[in-house]
Amino acid sequence: MERRKSPVLTAIHEDGVIERPPGLPSTTMAKRKANGLNTAEATTEGSSPATKDSDELITSLNALSASAFQEKYIKPSHLAPPSPQLSITFKSSASLTKGELNQCFDLISLTSRSHYEPSSFGWHSRRKLREMREEEMRYLLVRSTTLADRDGDSAVEGEVKGFLSFMLTHDSSPAVPVVYVYEIHLLPELRQCGLGGHLMQVAEDVARATGVEKVMLTCFVANETVRRWYEGRGYGVDVVSPEDRMTRRKVVKADYVIMSKAVK
Ligand SMILES: CC(C)(COP(=O)(O)OP(=O)(O)OC[C@H]1O[C@@H](n2cnc3c(N)ncnc32)[C@H](O)[C@@H]1OP(=O)(O)O)[C@@H](O)C(=O)NCCC(=O)NCCS
């Protein structure tokens, strides 16, 4: 599911001016504000903004084109499909076709809309599409192949049946460079045969190879099975995960959990 920005990503300058989080271009921050996502709602208490070095690391990784990123960090085994009827491709948001973007969106809607709608996130199609198109977003697409594909004719592309999207960014407290997995969704017919685990493994391999500290993600509390699946893969509750809130009348339970796994 989508990312909810953690409070530590807002750094207050010595002169009191609110600064963009390290590693994120100001254009991205402006977009986040426009999207209604949290850029300045929290204090910096207990936070430690990322260093110049880690800022430079994230900026330089995000500056790589999809093909340069793939050449450096995506191994051929990462793109080896589990069956000849499927293909795995690596793309940046800019290189997604409109059809691919819409098919990814439809998958999120199919698998997770029922979790979004009653949650504090709500279901906002346009906001979700905007996030999916953020320029630093990278994609692993799982598609069905057609006979023509298998004969080497790449002009015929099959439907997207699953995908994982991630971004190199800063998060947690203290803020560190991370791979943030924004989405992972497979059609039901592709589940339970190791494909989801493979896509997470690619994200973790990318995290190790690029030298970031953690892989992070957000999961609805209501999505118990998947939360347990993440736990089985070594993910635990991150320090920035929200806690239940006390109001005058009741306890408001957090409806999502931010999870992470250290890779260093
Ligand atoms: C979460 C999700 C991506 C997991 O993908 P998946 O491909 O089913 O995951 P895997 O097959 O790797 O693992 C699932 C189970 O299959 C089994 N499995 C793994 N490899 C297997 C194999 N080669 N053969 C048979 N079974 C296998 C394992 O028992 C594993 O269970 P575990 O929890 O004990 O590890 C998928 O369930 C999904 O798309 N869910 C809906 C979308 C969603 O909720 N996304 C998360 C948003 S936060």
Image: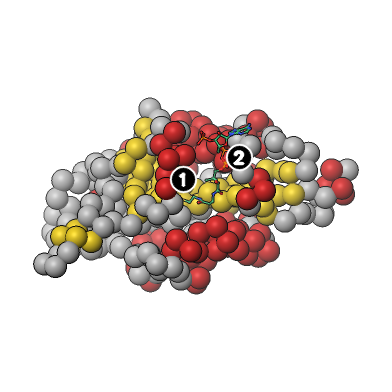
Which of disc 1 and disc 2 is earlier in sequence?
A: 2
The furthest residue to the top? 264
Q: Residue visible at 73% across and 44% down?
A: 86
Above/below status of 78 relative to 219:
above
Name the kind of residue labelled 1 in the image. Thr
Quadrant of ligand 1 in image? top right
Does residue 58 appear anywhere in the picture? no
Q: With 163 as the anchor, is 264 left or right in this view?
A: left
Q: With 121 as the anchor, is 200 left or right in this view?
A: right
Q: Secondary structure at mark 1?
A: helix
Q: Quarter of the image for the N terminus: give it.
A: bottom left
Q: Classify mark 2 as within 8 Å of ligand 1 or not, answering yes or no.
A: yes
Report which residue position mark 2 lands on: 192
Residue 23, how many percent across, how many down? Answer: 36, 49
Front in this rendered view, residue 76 or 61: 76
Residue 103, how many percent across, how many down? Answer: 64, 61
Q: Residue visible at 49% across and 48% down?
A: 166
Picture quadrant of residue 52: top left
Residue 11, how many percent across, how many down? Answer: 22, 54
Q: With 67 as the anchor, is 243 left or right in this view?
A: left
Residue 104, how many percent across, how many down? Answer: 60, 58
Name the kind of residue labelled 2 in the image. Gln
Front in this rendered view, residue 25 or 198: 198
Label ID, residue 225: 1
Q: Classify mark 1 as within 8 Å of ligand 1 or not, answering yes or no.
A: yes
Front in this rendered view, residue 16 or 222: 222
What is the crowding at mark 2: few (fewer than 14 residues within 10 Å), some, or many (at least 20)? few
What is the crowding at mark 1: few (fewer than 14 residues within 10 Å), some, or many (at least 20)? few
